[in-house]
């Protein structure tokens, strides 16, 4: 038998229910909230009073009442009361976006970390400085949560293995917290591909794409990442590494991968391998990755045969990996994100060549390939969504503002 929910849990749930309704349907009246949520009018009145004390909702005029009753007092969310901070760590950058409760960007800070391979210290330092800057800009707004997305598996809140950064088990949240002793909000670490997958999934749905139950997401920035979505939710697996398609072997005698295996998809599809195969010269320095990507794009657009052949081979490798994932998970769709979305026209022939046999043999099994629409902003869009959901789910963590000092 399930134990009854504690009164504190019920109150927390009801506060969230009321805040979400006002956020989605405001300006709205208490009677509308009661009718929509099923809460008693007295409970709604108490929840609204609590949310008002926390500065999360406020009255914003009146509406015409049905019948002869008094005019309805309308409520809206005070979006500027809470800021959330989204951080994305890449191989060379720390990107920060602070947003209010509407999701609107209120502060940005992009900075290079220049971290040596395997050393998280410079990354931690730059995250700390960037978050400190956001706190200073926030003024009277409450900082609800800091969410940090990293290119690596996240296991029980810690970075388990970030191959592209050379990190082993790293408690990134704790390290960042040491740099921000005056910040008392939660610090959460998430996988960047998972965040991008969620953002692209919802963006495509908004454009009319009907997703199947199981979707695999594949992205490429410098390395190759992925995510498995089931019912629109991230499936983490036993060790937090479900969906890591970049390390699916597609060749028995391929190149040695950084993960310790051979012939992984990443060895065919990461930017360095593609550039080398396409004949793009390697450069040194902080701008080498951007330069290589830009040159590869230029050659593809110009019809360079060696560049297009490199993408065709990569497409065959990607198709083989998608086929393997679909066979195990019964996924019905793949979403190509990051630079794979840009390169989709040159990857598609190889992908289709690998999938055609299965599609022909098992005609009732559908496997679609969609192209992401958010580009390089997908990860941060997903992180912003997670931060906003945290506050909407837990408005009780927003403190009641202290009264102004006497004489001020």
Image (cartoon, rainbow, N blue to C red):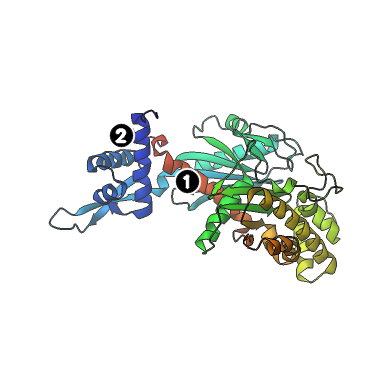
Q: Nearer the viewer, residue 96 or 188?
A: 188
The residue drawn where x is 63% and y is 36% is 238
The residue drawn where x is 23% and y is 43% is 41
Q: Quadrant of the C terminus?
A: top left
Q: How many residues crowd mark 1 within 10 Å: few (<14), some (14–19), many (20+)?
A: many
Circle 2 SS class = loop
Residue 27 located left or right of residue 168:
left
In the rendered image, residue 45, in percent from the top left (x then y), is placed at 25, 42
Residue to which mark 1 is pinned: 388
Query: Height in image: 172 above or below 48?
Result: above
Query: Height in image: 50 above or below 99?
Result: above
Circle 1 SS class = helix
In the rendered image, residue 113, in percent from the top left (x then y), is placed at 69, 42
Residue 63 located left or right of residue 236:
left
In the rendered image, residue 254, in percent from the top left (x then y), is placed at 85, 49
In the rendered image, residue 139, in percent from the top left (x then y), is placed at 45, 42
Quadrant in which residue 17 is drawn: top left
Mark linked to residue 36: none
Q: Nearer the viewer, residue 304 or 281?
A: 304
Residue 50 located left or right of residue 253:
left
């Amino acid at each position: 038998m399930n134990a009854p929910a504690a009164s504190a849990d019920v109150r927390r749930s009801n506060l969230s229910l009321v805040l979400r309704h006002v956020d989605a349907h405001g300006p709205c009246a208490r009677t509308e909230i009661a009718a929509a949520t099923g809460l008693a009018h007295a409970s709604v009145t108490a929840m609204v009073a609590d949310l008002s004390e926390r500065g999360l909702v406020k009255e914003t005029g009146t509406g015409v009442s049905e019948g002869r009753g008094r005019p309805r007092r309308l409520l809206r969310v005070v979006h500027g009361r809470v800021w959330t901070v989204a951080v994305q760590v890449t191989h060379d950058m720390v990107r920060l976006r602070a947003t209010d409760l509407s999701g609107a960007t209120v502060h940005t800070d992009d900075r290079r970390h220049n971290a040596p391979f395997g050393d998280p210290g410079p990354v931690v330092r730059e995250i700390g400085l960037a978050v400190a800057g956001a706190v200073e800009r926030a003024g009277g707004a409450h900082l609800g949560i800091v969410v940090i997305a990293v290119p690596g598996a996240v296991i029980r809140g810690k970075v388990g293995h970030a191959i592209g950064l050379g990190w082993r088990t790293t408690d990134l949240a704790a390290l960042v917290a040491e740099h921000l002793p005056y910040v008392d909000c939660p610090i959460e670490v998430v996988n960047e591909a998972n965040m991008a997958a969620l953002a692209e999934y919802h963006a495509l749905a908004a454009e009319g794409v009907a997703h199947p139950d199981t979707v695999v997401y594949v992205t490429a920035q410098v390395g190759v990442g992925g995510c498995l979505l089931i019912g629109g939710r991230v499936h983490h697996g036993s060790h937090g590494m479900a969906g890591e398609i970049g390390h699916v072997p597609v060749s028995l005698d391929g190149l040695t991968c950084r993960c310790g295996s051979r012939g992984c998809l990443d060895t065919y599809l990461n930017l360095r391998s593609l550039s080398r195969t396409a004949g793009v010269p390697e450069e040194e320095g902080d701008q080498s990755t951007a330069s290589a990507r830009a040159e590869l794009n230029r050659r593809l657009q110009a019809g360079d045969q060696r560049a297009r052949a490199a993408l065709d081979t990569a497409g065959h490798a990607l198709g083989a990996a998608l086929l393997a994932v679909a066979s195990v998970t019964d996924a019905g769709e793949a979403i190509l994100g990051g630079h794979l979305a840009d390169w989709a026209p040159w990857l598609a022939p190889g992908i289709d060549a690998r999938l055609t046999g299965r599609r022909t043999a098992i005609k009732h099994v559908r496997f679609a390939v969609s192209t992401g629409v958010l580009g390089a902003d997908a990860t941060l869009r997903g992180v912003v969504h997670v931060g906003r959901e945290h506050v909407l789910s837990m408005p009780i963590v927003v403190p009641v503002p202290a009264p102004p000092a006497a004489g001020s």
